[in-house]
Image (cartoon, coloured by chain):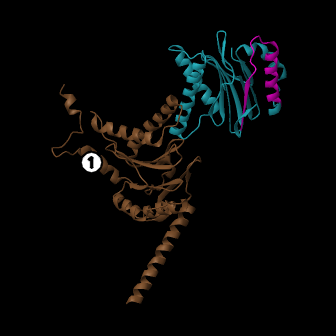
Chain colours: A cyan, B brown
Amino acid sequence: MDSLFGVAGDGFVVLAADAQVARSILLYQNDLDKIKELDSHKMMALAGPQADCNLFGEYIQKNMALYELNNDLRLSTKAAANYIRRELATALRKGPYQVNMLMGGVDAGAAALYWLDYLGTLQPVKYGAQGYGAAFTLSLLDRSYRVGMAEADAVELVRSCIAALHKRFLIAQPNFVIKVVDKDGIRVLK
Amino acid sequence: MAASYDRAITVFSPDGHLFQVEYAIEAVKRGSSVVGVRAADMLVVGVERRATAKLQDPRTIRKIVKVDAHLTLAFAGLTADARVLIDKARLEAQSYRLTCEDAPSLEYMARFIARTQQKYTQRGGMRPFGVSCMLAGFGTDGQPQLYQTDPAGTHSAWKANAIGGKSSKNMREFLEKNYPTEGGLDEAAAVKLCIKTLLEVVDSGAKNMEICLIRRDTPVETMSDTDMAAVVAQIEAEAEEAKKASAGSSMETS
């Protein structure tokens, strides 16, 4: 039921996630931040049951912090994405985490966005979407994404995806969290 | 099952000593000195840096390390043993964060390290860590805290302390003499006291020491060689002054 969007440009990544927690016919919460900050320049939006999202997201977060302390070295976005994929693939044959993700980060000015699912799929993308929202918005992203587009235009593109959902999607998702990461770190947009 | 008897190497001697633990404490004495000083709102940790070989990269020898975002650790003793202990502490800190959604307190981490060190004095097939640790960080109330652990597995909090090296006792006495009884220290005074104490054992001045400044909510700062040299020069000038003054007064009396 969750909707996640991501757009990567030159030196920045925009991630957006709905803020809803719902099960069956019941809505539990509509102000949850589903975009976890893995370190100062990496973030990950997670879709799936809230328990799995929290458990897996925090597990990755803490292991990356431990890696940094032990090696005095931070994982690159690519390395982190491959590490996350590996954790998912290992868990798949034991007790899989039911999480699908968009993970983005900026290192040394270069931005990267990755699409991951619970089966252990890892795909670098320029833009991507997860959940029911993907069916409504991939066409929009296909048409409007431009190589080298400005950060403000990318945020606008994500906002237009949210608007498309509001117009056509049966399930109401009024609240979204949008986050941008660039060379100065992560910031939250309204 | 005879093997299970030989495995325990830390057994009491008839007069109640644990020799292996005492030997481990001896190993700490053979290590380089560490001094920790608690100021009013920050901490200073200094270590004696033994001369590195001509072709060695000095940056690969680290005696002050980060265990968690808010926790700095300096050790005296066997570097190899310390690495294992530090790895355990780092893992525990992240594990605590994962389960408790909060950073472990300094007291908790000191207790954890001490508990781990104690475990290695009582279980079979183990050898005690030849390491004493000095932990510096901030409590939940935001106040600076300084803890010490030793190979026996005790932990204790201090205003200022010295571990490691043959003259750690002298250094502690020096700190006791010079730490103000009331009012605490400001940053400059704490740095000066730390360097002054280290100079009791380090002969070639600023070159052979490493000083870390630990402030609240900011990354740990390692003092530059020039800053250290400036403080050392200041201390030497003061010592010279004092000597002259005492020489002058003794002339007057004679």
Residue A95 drawn above or below residue B168: above
Specify the quadrant that holds the C terminus of chain B: bottom left
Q: Position of residue A30 (x, y in %)?
A: 69, 21
Res B180 visible: yes
Q: Is residue A162 left or right of residue B218?
A: right
Q: Hey, what amino acid is under mark 1?
A: Glu
Specify the quadrant that holds the N terminus of chain B: top left
**Residue farthest toward the left in the current orientation of the protein:** B14
User: Going 40% across and 56% down the picture, which residue do you hit?
Assistant: B162
Q: Position of residue A46 (x, y in %)?
A: 64, 22
Element type where label 1 sits in the image:
helix
Q: Position of residue B168 (x, y in %)?
A: 36, 58
A159 in the magenta segment: yes
Between A159 and A68, the one lying in front of the other is A159
Q: Residues within 10 Å of mark 1 (few under 14, many from 20)?
A: some
Res B34 visible: no
* Count of numbered marks: 1
Q: Is residue B97 left or right of residue B128?
A: right
Between B210 and B187, the one lying in front of the other is B187
Residue B179 quadrant: bottom left
Q: Is residue A151 left or right of residue A82?
A: right
User: Going 48% across and 32% down the picture, which residue do you hit?
Assistant: B96
Identify the chain of the residue marked 1, using the numbered disc in the image.
Answer: B
Residue B117 quadrant: top left
Residue B138 drawn above or below residue A158: below
A137 in the magenta segment: no
User: According to the image, label 1 marks what residue?
Assistant: B22
Q: Position of residue B25 (x, y in %)?
A: 31, 49
Q: Magenta residues, as a range?
A: A153-182
User: Going 66% across and 24% down the picture, which residue do you hit?
Assistant: A32
